[in-house]
Amino acid sequence: MASAANTNMNAVRETMDVLLEISRLLNTGLDMESLSICVRLCEQGINPEALSSVIKELRRASDSLKVSENSTSQG
Amino acid sequence: MAALDQKSPNVLLQSLCCRITGKSEADVAHQFQYAVRVIGSNYAPTIERDEFLVSEKIKKELLKQRREADAALFSELHRKLQTQGVLKHRWSILYLLLSLCEDPRKPSSRVGSYGAVFAQALPCDAHSTPFYYARPQSLSLSYPERSVLAAHNASSMGTSGISSLGVYPVNGPGPSPQSLLTGSGAQPVTDPARGSRLAWALPISGSPSGAAPPTSRPPVGPASGPPARPLHRQRRDGDGSAEISEAALVRDILYVFQGIDGKFIKMCAPENCYKIDSKVPLCKSLRDTSSRLAELGWLHNKVRKYTDSRSLDRAFGLVGQSFCASLHQELKEYYRLLSVLHAQLQVEDDQGVNVGVDSNLTLRRLLVWTYDPKIRLKTLAALVDYCQGRKGGELASAVHAYGKTGDPHMRALVQHILSLVSHPILNFLYRWIYDGELEDTYHEFFVASDPTVKTDRLWHDKYSLRKSMIPSFITMDQARKVLLIGKSINFLHQVCHDRTPPGKILPASKSTDSPKDAAELFTDLEGAFQSKIDAAYFETSKYLLDVLNKNYQLLDHLQAMRRYLLLGQGDFIRHLMDLLKPELARAATTLYQHNLTGILETAVRATNAQFDSPEILKRLDVRLLEVSPGDTGWDVFSLDYHVDGPIATVFTRECMSHYLRVFNFLWRAKRMEYILTDIWKSQMCNAKLLKSMPELSGVLHQCHVLASEMVHFIHQMQYYITFEVLECSWDELWNKVQQAQDLDHIIAAHDVFLDTIISRCLLDSNSRSLLNQLRAVFDQIIEFQNAQDTLYRSALEELQLRVQYEDNKRQREQEGEWGVTAEQEAAENKRVQEFKDTIPKMCSQLRLLTHFYQGIVQEFLRLLMTSSDESLQFLSFRLDFNEHYKARDPRLRPSLGATRGRRSSNI
């Protein structure tokens, strides 16, 4: 039982490694944790199209925040 | 993983948000909400779920980037992934990675596809489906300032070669706190053209704060950017460097759409339209196109101006407010479209327009996309024009008139506005027909109330229809019913003091449906609204009639009127006349009301009237009309019937005065009958007595003939009045009252009844001459009575003297003396002779009377025949049944023929 769980964990880890590699190849900018969250969301049947757009927007928002922070701190 | 799988998507999303923005949960609440919304609204993917296709796409993408080795590596990894089989939705995660793929060298490949998606989506967005606007590609989270966005986009693309070009040396390179492009290796800046493009594009966006620094990630600009960007732009923009570029025009137009003057396109006040400055060099087609587009701005301004001016005007009322609200709603959708367009423009600015001409905003494209909104705005503007200065129901009518169009889109639009506009009207209506309350501060509802009217005139005068405020989708009939329902409820409350809650009057029809649902009722075809009103109408009216009949004995009072004021109770009237005769023969000034009231009570107690309910009898009273000099009691006596409370609504003051007039007429006619009866009685009594005076027989015969003539006349008149006038009308009235559905029906029937009686009894102004003749006939009858009385008096006196004379004679003969002395006989003869001498005088007086009388009757007959009322013509036939008068008066003959001829010609 424990070994089965173990092999399962191994398989999962391997899968995640592969996905991380692909993500790196494609230059998606996702780190391990974000990627694993995304994978879980996708596994729950979320529309990847929408998810990708959300991620982009989130990045955009955080960037703009940072930029404005920078500019205010400099000004 | 299995355990983690149980986490809900929301939790995962939230941690994702935190992770990417690098902030705590509390700070990302806004972004999280957005993410949930986007995910929720785009649940079904628009792409096909094919792992193979996705993987091929990824490979192609890598090949495009000239990374063949990476492509091979990906194939290997993908194969591995397939063999492991841990994931169920492999295609999904692959697709996600693909779409997040950042090609450092060709950053805008994605943007191109956005443009395409946007372009596809927009035409349908132009309708009002707000959710489409939430398409993630075209929305930024918080609409940051354009400059900031531009800067950040430039950085996120990883094309920050700008700093190396020294365009923004101010901020200088600094370490980026964010590592967006974790995977991207350092790549040398090899794209000066790109840098120059950005340098060109940023100032155009008009934002000096665009000086925000591009982050100093290692420059990753790929070698092959689009060549010579400025050249490309210029070529697209058109011809000649002096002219304004189309992009600038597009930007201008977008401002004009919101009613803001652009750089080139400005509001031209005298001509009231948007115009391009004529000095600006521009080719004709662009000028035309932009003028056409600018119309949208003009329309927007028009609608906007209306709502702005009206929303502050409180007196504009609820209907107007909801009209403004609906206009606002439409404008909001229009603004949504504008924001989408703006976002698109920003994307273009940020990304550069290197994706090709296909996906850019151009004037022509705008023309197509704004086609539908323009039609909508046009409709709204026309509506606004048409509704200028209207309010309340009038406004609803105006909107409704615009709904009668064949264009389904326009109809739907107007229908929507109408449902909002009619909502307050419906609220008024339900308050009114279910509670009887009128909460119409701004006089918008079609029922008006006059607060100055007292409760006794409530039914007749208090409430009225405001004709102009009846919406055109409510028929006049419905409006009247609505008025009647509320009026009935108010009548019950205020006049009948009936405190039954309205819910009990309308047990079933106080329905639960909200006004929102009911807003559809106005326009439905099944007539649910009609049936609703009908139900309320029937219930309320029935309840009102029940209350009036049960608690206030309306019908009993009606019958009492018939019996007492219209002399229906024969025994009572006759007895009353008997009792009153000595009183009324006196001068009118010597009459006292209390004496008469006592006599009235005696008459009631002696006849069948005593069995009437005390409620009715106590209302019965005597009234003395105004006395003019020379009047006898007969002229001023009148019966009266007191009415008050709810009953007075039916028996109004005018009604009662009508009743009094009719009563006077009937009373007079009745008195004639009574007089003639007296005349006949005295004739019968005296006939035997006066047989002994043969010299009188001629005179008496004359009297008998005249009396029977009069009796015939009066009998026919009475017959006519009783049967043809009163009974017929009464029967009609009674039927109508039994079938009446509401109080108005009863009142109307009653009015008709009174009018008929008045006109048939010759009391209206048309038959004044007839009535005068009739009065003259009555006067002749009274004169005849007086003449005959004096005749009989003198004859009986004479008779008595003669009898006395004979008695004296006989007595003396018995005493053995001479019966008469010579002087006595001479005196007797002389007296007899004197008496005989008076006979011709009496004769001539009677002849004169007869002559007058017949003249009057003939005139009366002539008037009867020429009258248009058929029953009056029949009366004339009956009065002259043996053509006695016709034979005497030649005028009766031709007129008869004339009427016949006229009648046949009428037919």
Image: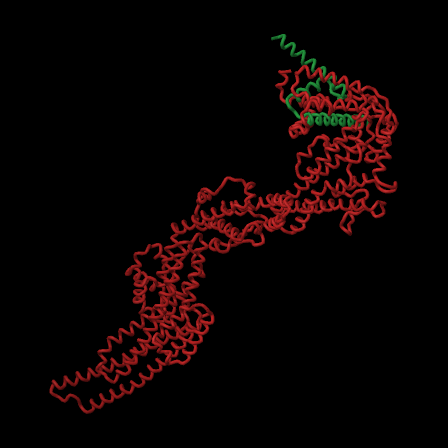
Chain colours: A green, B red
Q: Is residue B711 left or right of residue B517?
A: left
Location of residue A47 by image quarter: top right
Give the residue displayed 41% in from the left and 63% down from the top: B659
* Residue B853 appears in the picture as rendered: no
Give the residue displayed 78% in from the left and 41% down from the top: B363
Residue B198 vertical placement versus B761 (above, below): above
B58 or B375, which is in the foreground?
Answer: B58
Q: Position of residue B141 (x, y in %)?
A: 72, 30
Residue B614 vertical placement versus B527 (above, below): below
Q: Position of residue B641 (x, y in %)?
A: 38, 60
Residue extending furthest bottom? B822
Give the residue displayed 23% in from the left and 80% down from the top: B690
Q: Position of residue B747 (x, y in %)?
A: 44, 57
Q: Position of residue B877 (x, y in %)?
A: 37, 73
- Quadrant assignment for the N terminus of chain B: top right
B817 or B384, which is in the foreground?
Answer: B384
Location of residue B632 by image quarter: bottom left
Tally of numbered tags: 0
* Residue B489 appears in the picture as rendered: yes
Location of residue B377 by image quarter: top right
A46 or B497, which is in the foreground?
Answer: A46
Q: Is residue B798 left or right of residue A37?
A: left
Q: Is residue B434 left or right of residue B2?
A: left
Residue B368 vertical placement versus B639 (above, below): above
